[in-house]
Amino acid sequence: MEKARPLWANSLQFVFACISYAVGLGNVWRFPYLCQMYGGGSFLVPYIIMLIVEGMPLLYLELAVGQRMRQGSIGAWRTISPYLSGVGVASVVVSFFLSMYYNVINAWAFWYLFHSFQDPLPWSVCPLNGNHTGYDEECEKASSTQYFWYRKTLNISPSLQENGGVQWEPALCLLLAWLVVYLCILRGTESTGKIEQLANPKAWINAATQIFFSLGLGFGSLIAFASYNEPSNNCQKHAIIVSLINSFTSIFASIVTFSIYGFKATFNYENCLKKVSLLLTNTFDLEDGFLTASNLEQVKGYLASAYPSKYSEMFPQIKNCSLESELDTAVQGTGLAFIVYTEAIKNMEVSQLWSVLYFFMLLMLGIGSMLGNTAAILTPLTDSKIISSHLPKEAISGLVCLVNCAIGMVFTMEAGNYWFDIFNDYAATLSLLLIVLVETIAVCYVYGLRRFESDLKAMTGRAVSWYWKVMWAGVSPLLIVSLFVFYLSDYILTGTLKYQAWDASQGQLVTKDYPAYALAVIGLLVASSTMCIPLAALGTFVQRRLKRGDADPVA
Amino acid sequence: MLWLLFFLVTAIHAELCQPGAENAFKVRLSIRTALGDKAYAWDTNEEYLFKAMVAFSMRKVPNREATEISHVLLCNVTQRVSFWFVVTDPSKNHTLPAVEVQSAIRMNKNRINNAFFLNDQTLEFLKIPSTLAPPMDPSVPIWIIIFGVIFCIIIVAIALLILSGIWQRRRKNKEPSEVDDAEDKCENMITIENGIPSDPLDMKGGHINDAFMTEDERLTPL
């Protein structure tokens, strides 16, 4: 006997919750980057194929499992087979790692949002140096947006080893971000849905990876969401809708991002031309305003021939301004969101308005995804009778938020951004591939594809089309295995892992090697989630053996 | 004789003011960049104004109150517009030390800029760095104010939600104690068998069939 499970008020709420979870920051800062790196529009071909072959079937599978088992990830997989409860635990562990570091992004978005109410925007001007005769040195070498990100926001240390202390400003913003998340999950299902990484064979692999992570498979969030569905809910339709909306959002975001790139590139190109003109005008005492963009090359040629010695002296200082090289700068991740976009915004009219809107959008995306993550952690916890009998739901949510917030303070230290990059790159990637692979194999071969199909038919009243069955049983597992093999071999072949550190004296990023303890942490991250699966299976096996050992003497 | 003296004086002046001479400063103006269509032409009258501004700045320095416009010498005016200038002492044989001129110009840079409708970027004295205006720094940073507002709103909302949750639970706990506990609990529960929810037996729905005699009545009393 169980208490009635809370349900979504209507199926629209469920769809919105899934969409808000799946559509996250990856759509904004990863997909446009991939498009740019792998040939622009032609990247859409592998992307859409992978969507149809891998994304939709796996999404449908997770939703169906959740709706059928009506429990969070741990309970659902335990029901499928007691040996597989480790899959659920692994999902929860990965979700836990993700929620630890993901909310830091929301904290940064809050920081920028609060700073958008100033004129001029703080990242558009460099601060003055000590004796007020010029601008700060680091800011001159880099740019004002980079300076604001690396120095004012992160106060980043030159390397991973130098930890520094916890910075109180980002710590406050992180606290606020966690309070907002707590507010949203406090009332559980009723409040979550209200509004609300992701030809090259590399292109195909990246398309597959992007679809995989963009939909948020393997975290247990989708299982958690679907477990609150009515059994008769048509989750096939919803799976298709969510995956399509997710992809359209990615494509739309890349259109916007490319226009921002174009704006920034044009602005920087024109600035570069102005600087070269000024340099020439000052060196040769030409008439002010004589040099324009159109006659620049002509005049350069004339000057080179008329004053060869003077021209060759100052020639090293002339930069070759090219619009193509400006457009070529492809950035992803926090660099895109907080440096490139802010640089474009600061040059727009009414920049405060655009800035507020942009960071508000980032916050919405980030918090929507955070809610899905915390749902993945909370649902198994509230499902478990041991915990939910001792503590009310609000206390469990509060405890989870508190623990995550406390651990998240690590990312507000001076070296915090380097730890953030470690978590971002390694906490979820390999483990998720393994988890989803085990999920697919478990449903198709351990639980039985025919049994699952008849369950779904009994539950929803609709038969499962042959397409889904072929994908679940054959194509998707094969694809995931190949992705897994590729990434493993890539990690092994590249040797020691490196990271980008900010060098304040040069005003740019430099590559450094990870120290030993950082590599240990990376190994621990990957191992702690993947080892759950075999360990739990072993645990159940030992448990059963002991029980049988007890039962035998009696019989 | 007079011509000779005139040539001598101009020669000495020419030596005093030369590009790269001791205590000489180069000035660069970007009038068209600053004013666009409203740019004025640089002629001797503007040069006179410039000399007047420099002399004015020097007169503010203690011990140099006697500086006249004729003590300021300009040379090498280019199309740019750029030129060199020196300030001589009353004897017109020596130039004033660069340090003094530098500090005088720095103190009055704003007045000089305004006289020509220019700013620090468009009226440059090379080798005299201008003091940049620091950005406005309010005593309490703006972001903390906004942070404080949003923080308080969120805390209040959380407190309200938690309190209303506690009230609801207390109300739910009070009601069943007035009615029979067990039957109500059974009604609210949905049994889960094999993971599929099934309807519970309708406990209250049974009727007593009067035609069926109870056990007691079958046995006739003694």
Image (cartoon, rainbow, N blue to C red):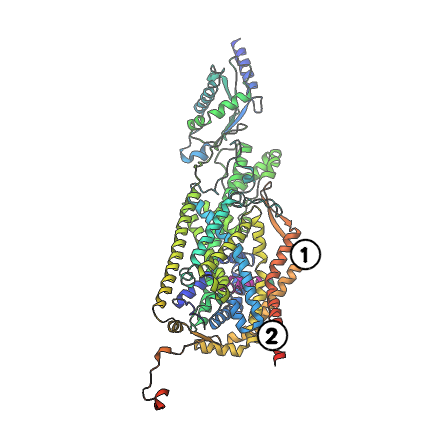
Foreground residue among A443 and A551: A551
Please give the range of residues in magenta.
A202-221
Amino acid type at image mark 1: Gly
Residue A15 location (% of width, % of height): 43, 65
Q: Main secondary structure of the magenta part?
A: helix
Foreground residue among A525 and A511: A525
- Which mark, residue A495? 1
Where residue A505 sits, quadrant-wise, is: top right
Task: Describe the element under mark 2 as helix, strand or loop.
Answer: helix
Are the residues under badges 1 and 2 in a single subunit? yes
Q: Is residue A265 visible?
A: no
Foreground residue among A510 and A266: A510
* Contact (Cβ within 8 Å) of mark 1 with mark 2: no
Q: Residues within 10 Å of mark 2 (few under 14, many from 20)?
A: few
- Which mark, residue A547? 2
Amino acid type at image mark 2: Lys
Q: Earlier in the sequence, mark 1 or mark 2?
A: 1
